[in-house]
Image (cartoon, rainbow, N blue to C red):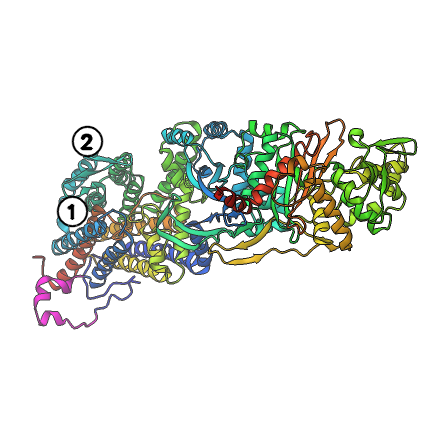
Amino acid sequence: MYRRGDELGPQMNNRLALRIAIFGGVAIALFAVLFLRLWFLQVINGDKYLAEAKNNRTREFKITAPRGKILDRNGGVLVANGTSLALQLNPRKLPASQKERRAELAQLADLTHSTLRRLRKTIGEQESVSPGAPVTLRKDVGHYLVYYMQENQVRFPGVTVQRVFVRRYPHGTLAAHILGNVGEISEEELKESLYRRLEPGDEIGQDGVEYTYDRFLRGHPGLERIQVDALGQPTRNGRLFSQPPVPGDNLKLSIDTPVQEAGEAAMASFGLRGGFVTMDVHTGEILALGSYPTYEPSILIEPTQAQVNELYRDPVLAPLTDRAIAGLYPTGSTFKPITAIAALESGNLQLSEAIEDRGQLVVGGEVFKNAGEAANGTVSLVSALEVSSDVFFYTLGLRMWDSGDLQHWAHALGIGRPTGIDLPGAAEGLLPSKQWRNRLYKEGETERPWSAGDNVQLATGQGDLQTNPLQMAISYAAIANGGTIVTPHIGLQVDDAAGRVLKEFDPPPRRHVHIDPEYREAILEGLHDAAQNGGGTSFPVFGSFPIPVAGKTGTAQRPPYEDQSWYGVLAPYPNPRIVTFVTMEEGGFGVEAAAPAARTILEAYFAHRLSEAAKPEEGKP
Amino acid sequence: MYATRTRRARPEPFALRPGIAERLGLPYMDATLGLAAFGLVAFSVFVLGQATQHDVPGNPGYYVDRQMIYAVLGLVGMYLLARADYSRFRELRVGIYTFLCISVGLVFVFGFAARGSRRAFELPFFSFQPSELGKLLLVLALAGFVIDGARQGSARQRTVRYLCLGLAPAALVFLQPDLGTSLVYGAITLAVMYVGGVRWTHFAVIGAALVAITALVLVVAPAVGTPILKEYQQQRLTSFTHPSEDPSDAGYQQNQAKIAIGSGEKTGRGDRATQTRLDFVPERHTDFIFAVIGERYGFVGAAFVLSLYALLIWRALRIVTLSKNSYGTLVAGGIAAMLLFQVFVNVGMNLGIMPITGIPLPLLSYGGSSVLATLLAVGVLQSIHMQARLSQKGRFAW
């Protein structure tokens, strides 16, 4: 501090000068502090604060991708996406006080049919993944709840109603077991490599083709980075980054909706537990596949406790079980063509050979009788199939009891082994064999070793055999197509949203079995006679069917239940394109329940040809 | 320091060609001081223009237009005051002091309340906050009392008298409640006493008392259940010691201001500034305008502003030494202290090293009363400068 000499001022004494100097020194010090602090904040730590500022003002939102549609083989929609209203909660906007927060959550849990604990867990999970993002409390809420929430908005801070995607099933229960359902990914599933890139709250297929073809149907979620203000509200033009979601691809199934409808209707008309399958014998494409009792897939979107109870309560009814692929049943006489192949191919039976059927066969002191105790006299293979002579096949069973030929051929034709179908939950089944029973016997699980009687039982599809309509259909298809064990499949192709085919599914056959064409012809002839010759077992049902078919009834003994009705049919004869298998628990004789159902299915499949055949007749005067 | 008392030959070109500048008195004013003040107030208008466009829906110029009017009025007032002889105020000290106390006190009767505090009168065109002008009035009056009471009573009595004179209006402002401004009054009082020559020992006692009172107010009183400060005031005063992420905490604002300034880095974020644009920093047009400058213009801009303040205060201190009389010395000292205190506390608050006290940044913060009062104070400084120059030439004010 100095003053210019030419400026007059009061006599400044030295004490004042000192004070002013100190004043100036203090000012310099204070400014130094400010400058240094400014330097520290902006130059030294600027990048850190810049990162903080950026983090401050952005929020990331995941945009759910709509799942692909599921179509039938003609492009008809089986599963579509609807939007529904979902209740969402922004946890940041919950009341600050513990007590109020608890009260609101408890009320919300009550309104959404949940529990306070579950709700808290959901919120916690969501917060750990994408903090600040709203948590979905309940999807598919009814309008009454939405109105209630809107009227009482003050009581529920942070609760909003959002539109979300929900699976829609235009055909109701149709193909419920094939389609399956979607649900939120579980903690365990998150750990699987299949779901590597998913996060809690994401939806995945849980069953059916939704599960199998999840990776195609799922799509990729979009991402939106939005600039928000201090209150967390998106700012105007605040979209910083937006990656639109990639919708899932559409999945086209081999399902033929009219056939599927006919099959389900037929099952429902009997009201018996059971399953059915209709398959292309050459390609393995499944045209129809169903199980009864069935269920409404839409209730699995957000089931109430009562609905869950209904679905799981009765282990006998088990509506979620797909009996066509997961059933474990003896098949009755529908097994006989398999026995015939085994006997012929292993040389235990000559085509020309006739066997005397006296109505019963005694094996090891045990008497095996024909069904209905009929005596068919001398029967060849063809007539044995036509009238379903048990004794004929008992005899074959007896001939092969120790050699394992029956097991070898049945196994080769696909009985008691995985089918490779593209649906989860298929059962492997059980083909009883000498090794199997002797092992059980050694382990003390059963009271006796393998005996001829076991094989005699198996030859007619009784006893310990456990299989299902799908495995049977595959073996019949192999007989019909000359030995190709097809891979059954329901997925046909994947199309993108624009309809371009991305991928076609044409799984190669599992294997080939050598079947002599002569044997094939003989067996088909026997089956054709059984269905459409006057003395045939299913003549009452198929005798009047205008298209030649080859079908076999079956009546399986399945204590403690009543006899189980079976029917397997190949059509059209003599060069079948499709195989249909139907079974109904406690349906009695094959011709009583399963065969009429099979006819209904065939009528639907051949509807076009049948109506054309009917037209000229109408035209006649 | 004061060693250069010898006369130096200096050409005086203005004396030879008296023109419009001479007649306006411009050569006798401190150009640097004027430019610094003008620069700051112009920068204020510029910053408000950029940062507050969206603050008042449908009226992007709301703050800019008003601030510009205040600036023009203030600059005119500054010029008029500069042309007046500040020594008159010494004679008017009792009147000024009375006016100060009454105007500050009248707020309790007629003032309108904003955010729980009565500070301003609602006038037709703007709300007038008497405590802002009161800062200058206190300097003018107190300096007069110190000069005239210099020979009355003992040193101790004088010190007590000055303190009481200064603290009475401070107490009134404190009760409005406006903690920040009352602290400025305290700083002014101490500065005038300091320049006025109050003994060091007395300052030591005052300092000790201040420490004791601070402890009492912040620690003891709340502990025994008779808080003197309102809870939010207490929180604001102590929050800078613990920055917070919680928006409901007082420390949150300060943390956000700190992030804003830091994120400006060297050259600023311009219109991409988010902290001060998206409401993370509150009061961005008033108390936290420095954060806006820091974020938008970076170290370059913030340092420029600080430099202008340094210039302003340097010139004020220089005028302390130039003054033709002791009254001018005291007044200039008081104004210098007033500016320094406000700048340091406000910028320090923005930088997170001082508590939140609600002190505006002189000339930069939006607000008519503050801008006017500060420009008038600069006008008084100019007047002291001018009188010194004129008396040296043997001429007097018009």
* Residue B90: numbered disc: 1
Pinpoint residue A103: horizontal percent, then vertical percent.
47, 27
Which image quadrant for residue B157? top left
Residue at position x 75%, y 47% from top? A523
* Chain label for disc 2: B
Residue ID for mark 2: B109
Q: Which residues are magenta?
A: B8-29
For marks 2 and 1, the one nearer the N-term is 1
Pinpoint residue B222: horizontal percent, then vertical percent.
42, 31
Q: Nearer the viewer, residue B77 or A234?
A: A234
Of the residues tagged 2 and 1, which is closer to the observer? Answer: 2
* Chain label for disc 1: B
Which image quadrant for residue B72? bottom left
Q: Is residue A181 visible?
A: no
Marks 2 and 1 share the same chain: yes
Answer whether residue A310 is magenta in the image: no
* Residue A493: numbered disc: none
Which image quadrant for residue A467? top right
Q: Classify the position of the C terminus of chain B by image quarter.
A: bottom left
A236 left or right of B125 in image: right
A274, above or below B345, in the image: above
